Image (cartoon, rainbow, N blue to C red):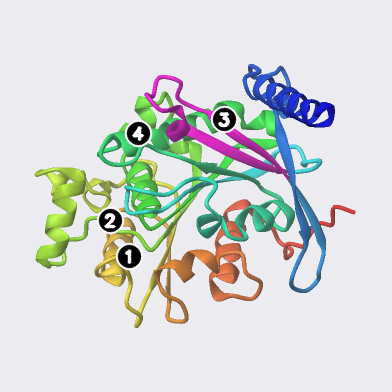
């Protein structure tokens, strides 16, 4: 009896400690926030033991009805190098589902970006449909970027080296935010905040004449969707950063006309004088294009590193950093 009572009370004490820790205000040093150490040995060569520090559920917009949907996670090295580049990731899910901590969306990305590329990795939530209807969802992403720009130095990140990546619905959102200055301007920033964008398997509003696509975009953006989508907002000299666009080709995608969407936005960007890398892949489908990013030797990983290196100026290949 006394043993059961002790165990029950001990559980309550632990729960109380966790609750107090999670409600603690942002400390002078952001790294004093509650966090988790995650990692392990790589399942591939060089079988390095990696370790990332995971800061969870940091709210970037306190005014939202449900702040879980306006929160983000930050992943760093155990001892991050000062002024590390920053990769901000926006999950997919058809604008209706998904979460910043979903293993299917993240896969090897925190491990890869932190322990191989030496980045600080940030995964963000945004409001989902029906509350998160355009332009609310895009503005959430811009507000998250503004938070990152203001606070990421406290986690070892360089606010002058912020990259933005998204998959599926997330790719549509990052393209929307990165082609139209209004969203970051509303957040008190400008497009100069972004050094590069990786849009993976998204829909960008390219009108392919398919009725199903027209109905989908009208449902997402409203009756004036042709003026709201990313491809319509591209303008020369508006500060749009370099783009890398990944899409599947020769394989059926969940995004109708995925190849036409990517090629159409790439063409508009190039005509506006924006640097674009367009990567078509036929060895994976819609989800695989996201899940393979970070897998050693995969063409998506190889081309991603080349794209990032062309911007950051890194001359030598990235090497895995051991936590031991």
Image height check: is 248 above or below 314? below
Classify mark 3: helix, strand or loop.
strand
Mark 3 crowd level (few <14, some 14–19, many ≥20, 10 Å Cα): some
Mark 2 crowd level (few <14, some 14–19, many ≥20, 10 Å Cα):
many
The CA distance from mark 1 to mark 4 is: 22 Å
Q: Which residue is mark 2?
A: 204
Q: Which residue is mark 3?
A: 58
* Disc 2 secondary structure class: loop
Q: Nearer the viewer, mark 3 or mark 2?
A: 3
The residue carrying mark 1 is 262
Q: Quadrant of the N terminus?
A: top right
62 in the magenta segment: yes
Q: Residue 249 falls in which quadrant of the image?
A: bottom left
Q: Give the distance between the C-alpha atoms of the residues marked 2 and 4, in whole angstroms.
A: 16 Å
- What is the CA distance from the residue labelled 1 to the residue labelled 2? 7 Å
User: Which segment is the magenta one?
Assistant: 53-76
- Disc 4 marks which residue? 139
Residue 80 seen in this snapshot: yes
- In the picture, the quarter occupied by the C terminus is bottom right
Residue that appears at 28% across and 41% down: 129
Whether residues under marks 1 and 2 lie with C-beta atoms below 8 angstroms apart, the answer is yes
- Alpha-carbon neighbours of circle 1 within 10 Å: few (<14), some, or many (≥20)? many
Q: Residue at x 32, y 47 (%)?
A: 96
| Distance between mark 3 and mark 4 Cα atoms | 17 Å
Q: Count the marks: how many?
A: 4
């Amino acid at each position: 009896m006394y043993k059961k009572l002790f165990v029950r009370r001990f559980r309550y004490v632990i729960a109380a400690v966790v609750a107090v820790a999670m409600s603690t205000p942002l400390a002078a040093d952001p790294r004093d926030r509650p966090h988790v150490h995650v990692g392990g040995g790589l399942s591939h060569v060089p079988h390095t033991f990696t370790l990332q520090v995971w800061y969870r559920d940091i709210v970037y917009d306190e005014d939202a009805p449900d702040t879980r949907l306006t929160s983000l996670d930050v992943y760093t090295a155990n001892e991050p190098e000062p002024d590390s580049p920053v990769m901000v990731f926006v999950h997919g899910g058809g604008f209706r589902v998904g979460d910043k901590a979903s293993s299917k969306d993240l896969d090897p990305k925190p491990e890869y970006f932190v322990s191989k590329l030496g980045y600080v990795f940030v995964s963000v939530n945004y409001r989902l449909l029906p509350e998160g209807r355009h332009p609310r969802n895009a503005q959430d992403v811009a507000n998250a970027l503004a938070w990152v720009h203001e606070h990421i130095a406290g986690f070892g990140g360089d606010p002058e080296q912020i990259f933005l990546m998204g998959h599926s619905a997330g790719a549509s959102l990052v393209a929307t935010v990165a082609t139209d200055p209004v969203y970051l301007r509303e957040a008190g920033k400008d497009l100069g905040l972004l050094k590069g964008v990786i849009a993976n398997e998204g829909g960008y509003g390219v009108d392919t004449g398919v009725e199903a696509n027209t109905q989908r975009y009208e449902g997402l953006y409203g009756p004036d969707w042709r003026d709201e989508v990313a491809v319509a907002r591209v303008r020369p000299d508006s500060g749009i950063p370099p783009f890398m666009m990944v899409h599947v080709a020769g394989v059926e995608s969940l995004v109708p006309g995925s190849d036409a969407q990517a090629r159409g936005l790439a063409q508009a960007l190039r005509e506006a004088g924006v640097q674009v890398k367009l990567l078509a892949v036929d060895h994976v489908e819609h989800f695989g294009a996201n899940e393979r990013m970070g897998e050693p030797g995969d063409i998506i990983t190889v081309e991603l590193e080349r794209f990032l290196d062309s911007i950051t100026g890194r001359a030598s290949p990235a090497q895995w950093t051991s936590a031991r």
